[in-house]
Image: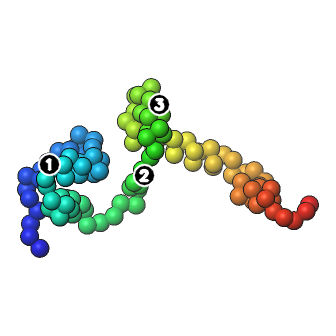
Amino acid sequence: MTKANKELVKFIREARKRGFDDIQIKEPLLKNNWSLAEIEKAFAYITPKYKFKNKVDIYLDSDILRILEKRSKQNLFTISEQIEDIIRRSCITAKKNKNKTEKLDDLLVSIFSRKKK
Protein backbone atom coordinates (compact mmCIF):
# COMPACT_ATOMS: atom_id res chain seq x y z
CA MET A 1 0.00 0.00 0.00
CA THR A 2 1.40 3.38 -0.97
CA LYS A 3 1.65 6.21 1.51
CA ALA A 4 -1.02 8.87 1.84
CA ASN A 5 -0.47 12.28 0.27
CA LYS A 6 1.17 14.46 2.98
CA GLU A 7 -0.50 17.64 1.69
CA LEU A 8 -3.91 16.00 1.84
CA VAL A 9 -3.30 14.61 5.34
CA LYS A 10 -2.23 18.06 6.53
CA PHE A 11 -5.35 19.63 4.99
CA ILE A 12 -7.66 17.09 6.68
CA ARG A 13 -6.03 17.55 10.08
CA GLU A 14 -6.33 21.33 9.80
CA ALA A 15 -9.98 21.11 8.72
CA ARG A 16 -10.78 18.84 11.68
CA LYS A 17 -9.07 21.27 14.05
CA ARG A 18 -11.36 23.99 12.69
CA GLY A 19 -14.41 21.88 13.53
CA PHE A 20 -15.36 20.43 10.15
CA ASP A 21 -16.65 16.87 10.09
CA ASP A 22 -15.39 14.28 7.62
CA ILE A 23 -18.28 14.71 5.19
CA GLN A 24 -17.74 18.48 5.08
CA ILE A 25 -14.06 17.83 4.35
CA LYS A 26 -14.59 15.17 1.66
CA GLU A 27 -17.15 17.03 -0.45
CA PRO A 28 -14.91 19.95 -1.53
CA LEU A 29 -11.97 17.60 -2.07
CA LEU A 30 -14.05 15.52 -4.47
CA LYS A 31 -15.28 18.66 -6.22
CA ASN A 32 -11.64 19.72 -6.68
CA ASN A 33 -10.77 16.47 -8.49
CA TRP A 34 -9.12 14.54 -5.67
CA SER A 35 -9.76 10.84 -6.21
CA LEU A 36 -11.91 9.06 -3.67
CA ALA A 37 -9.20 6.43 -3.23
CA GLU A 38 -6.61 9.12 -2.37
CA ILE A 39 -9.01 10.82 0.06
CA GLU A 40 -9.89 7.54 1.78
CA LYS A 41 -6.21 6.65 2.04
CA ALA A 42 -5.50 9.98 3.77
CA PHE A 43 -8.40 9.51 6.20
CA ALA A 44 -7.28 5.94 6.94
CA TYR A 45 -3.77 7.23 7.65
CA ILE A 46 -5.13 9.76 10.16
CA THR A 47 -7.71 7.52 11.82
CA PRO A 48 -6.41 5.93 15.02
CA LYS A 49 -6.11 2.17 14.99
CA TYR A 50 -7.99 1.87 18.28
CA LYS A 51 -11.58 2.61 19.25
CA PHE A 52 -12.82 5.06 21.85
CA LYS A 53 -15.54 3.81 24.14
CA ASN A 54 -16.72 7.34 24.81
CA LYS A 55 -16.98 8.44 21.17
CA VAL A 56 -20.33 8.54 19.40
CA ASP A 57 -21.04 9.64 15.84
CA ILE A 58 -24.53 10.82 15.04
CA TYR A 59 -26.13 12.29 11.98
CA LEU A 60 -28.82 14.89 12.61
CA ASP A 61 -31.63 16.27 10.53
CA SER A 62 -30.84 19.84 9.46
CA ASP A 63 -33.86 21.20 11.40
CA ILE A 64 -32.66 19.54 14.60
CA LEU A 65 -29.15 20.79 13.97
CA ARG A 66 -30.44 24.39 13.65
CA ILE A 67 -32.27 24.05 16.96
CA LEU A 68 -29.14 22.66 18.63
CA GLU A 69 -27.01 25.47 17.15
CA LYS A 70 -29.42 28.08 18.51
CA ARG A 71 -29.53 26.46 21.95
CA SER A 72 -25.76 26.02 22.07
CA LYS A 73 -25.23 29.71 21.26
CA GLN A 74 -27.61 30.68 24.06
CA ASN A 75 -25.73 28.45 26.49
CA LEU A 76 -22.29 29.48 25.17
CA PHE A 77 -21.54 25.87 24.21
CA THR A 78 -20.25 24.22 21.09
CA ILE A 79 -22.76 21.87 19.50
CA SER A 80 -20.84 18.87 20.88
CA GLU A 81 -20.92 20.35 24.37
CA GLN A 82 -24.65 21.05 24.03
CA ILE A 83 -25.37 17.46 23.00
CA GLU A 84 -23.22 16.19 25.86
CA ASP A 85 -25.15 18.42 28.29
CA ILE A 86 -28.50 17.14 27.00
CA ILE A 87 -27.38 13.52 27.38
CA ARG A 88 -25.95 14.17 30.85
CA ARG A 89 -29.19 15.81 32.02
CA SER A 90 -31.21 12.96 30.53
CA CYS A 91 -29.12 10.39 32.43
CA ILE A 92 -29.51 12.33 35.69
CA THR A 93 -33.27 12.53 35.18
CA ALA A 94 -33.43 8.81 34.40
CA LYS A 95 -31.44 8.06 37.54
CA LYS A 96 -33.85 10.13 39.65
CA ASN A 97 -36.87 8.43 38.09
CA LYS A 98 -35.42 4.95 38.58
CA ASN A 99 -37.33 4.57 41.83
CA LYS A 100 -40.69 4.72 40.09
CA THR A 101 -42.70 1.51 40.29
CA GLU A 102 -43.14 0.96 36.54
CA LYS A 103 -40.54 1.36 33.89
CA LEU A 104 -41.59 3.19 30.74
CA ASP A 105 -41.18 0.06 28.60
CA ASP A 106 -43.42 -1.91 30.94
CA LEU A 107 -45.98 0.87 30.84
CA LEU A 108 -45.98 0.97 27.04
CA VAL A 109 -46.33 -2.81 26.84
CA SER A 110 -49.29 -2.69 29.20
CA ILE A 111 -50.95 0.09 27.19
CA PHE A 112 -50.62 -1.73 23.88
CA SER A 113 -51.17 -5.22 25.24
CA ARG A 114 -54.18 -7.21 24.03
CA LYS A 115 -54.68 -8.63 27.51
CA LYS A 116 -57.60 -7.13 29.37
CA LYS A 117 -56.98 -6.00 32.89
Q: Residue at x 41, y 55 (%)?
A: 56
The amino acid type found where label 1 is placed reads Asn
Can you identify the residue that label 2 sits on? 58
Q: Quadrant of residue 78?
A: top left
Q: Position of residue 109 (x, y in %)?
A: 76, 60
Residue 107 or residue 37, whichever sits in front = 37
As drawn, which residue projects farthest toward the top?
74
Q: Nearer the viewer, mark 3 or mark 1?
A: 1
Mark 2 residue crowding within 10 angstroms, few (<14) / some (14–19) / many (20+): few
* Front residue (pair 31, 6): 31
Residue type beneath disc 3: Arg
Along the line of sight, the residue nearer the viewer: 50 or 2: 2
* Colour scheme of the rendered structure: rainbow
User: Residue at label 3?
Assistant: 71
First reached walking from the N terminus: tag 3 or tag 1? 1
Instruction: List x then y, in percent, for residue 43.
Output: 21, 59
What residue is drawn where x is 29% and y is 50%? 23
- For the point 71% across and 54% down, which residue is it? 104
Establish if 92 lies above or below 107.
above
Cα separation, mark 3 vs mark 2, equals: 18 Å
Q: Earlier in the sequence, mark 2 or mark 1?
A: 1
Residue 24 tag number: none
Mark closest to the chain's N terminus, 3 or 2: 2
Question: Relative to the observer, which residue lies in front, 103 or 117?
Answer: 117
**Mark 1, residues whose alpha carbon is within 10 Å: few (<14), some, or many (≥20)?**
few
Secondary-structure class at tag 2: loop
| Quarter of the figure with the C terminus | bottom right
Residue at disc 1, secondary structure: loop
Which numbered marker is on residue 32? 1
Q: State the quadrant of the N terminus.
A: bottom left
Which residue is located at x 19 percent, y 60 percent? 36
- Residue that extends furthest to the bottom in the rendered view of this protein: 1
